[in-house]
Image: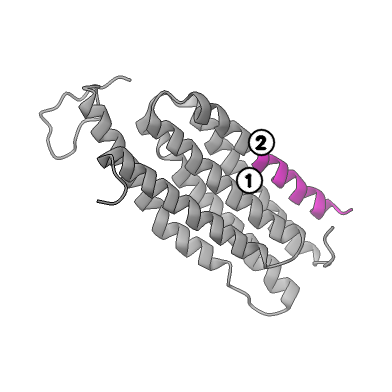
Amino acid sequence: MTVVELPLWAEITVGTLVFLSASIALVCSAGLMRLRHFFERVHLPAITGTLGCWCMVLASIVFFSVKEGSLTIFPIVIAIFMSITVPISTIFLMRASLFRARQMEKSVPPSINNQTRPDVWES
Amino acid sequence: MSIFFLALSLALFILVLAMACTLPRLIKGPTAQDRVLALDCMYLNAMLAMMVLSLIYADSLYFEAALLIALLGFVGTAAMAKFLLRGEVIE
């Protein structure tokens, strides 16, 4: 399906980075089932959105630069966008989950400002 | 049919597998925020799959689709988290 022929070093670099990114995404998605508590699971999409996304963006930069014959860095727009939005959505979800857990009077992770809460919390 | 094409296809298959891995949490997730989190993860996997497609077809047009998926995923997650927090999206 690929019409362009890349040199061998570019194929190895792009293939390794893409495979690494896909593996990271698979590990994070499998961890979504495996980890027990929501406050552990909430970090997993952030890992996909930073490490996995950066690996894929670097692979795309190498691929399109070699294909075009000049430096092409437009894929970095996605990495910049993800680095802005991923913390926001993670913090939003965490705050909503904390609010709901406190409202239902379940145990939540201890606050780092207020150490009077018990340090032990179970799901 | 080169090794490079096979590696990209394998990465695409792994990403589809990752999307399937988020499904159980989306369906049975004990709380609402678990479902939102699974949907967020699925959006990210779909975005990565779209970027792999852009490498397979050697076409930069797929990047705009990936950017669109990322944007919609962020807006959806933020809106649903806001709804879970306040009971209303826009106040």
Tell me where residue A18 appears, x and y as whole percent.
66, 52
Tell me where residue A56 appears, x and y as whole percent.
61, 56
Name the residue at 31% across, 34% down.
Answer: A97
Please give the residue where the numbered disc 2 appears in the rendered image: B17
- Residue interval drawn in magenta: B1-16
**Disc 2: host chain:** B
Name the residue at 26% across, 28% down.
Answer: A101
**Is B2 left, or right, of B35 in this rendering?**
right
As displayed, is residue A44 above or below residue A78? above
Tell me where residue B50 appears, x and y as whole percent.
65, 54
Look at the magenta stretch and give its main secondary structure: helix
> Which residue sits furthest right?
B1
Give the amino acid at mark 2.
Leu
Q: Secondary structure at mark 1?
A: helix
Image quadrant where residue A96 sits: top left
Please give the residue where the numbered disc 1 appears in the rendered image: A22
Q: Are marks 1 and 2 on the same chain?
A: no
Around disc 1, counting alpha carbons within 10 Å, would you say few (fewer than 14), some (14 to 19), or many (20 or more)? Answer: many
Q: Nearer the viewer, residue A104 or A47?
A: A104
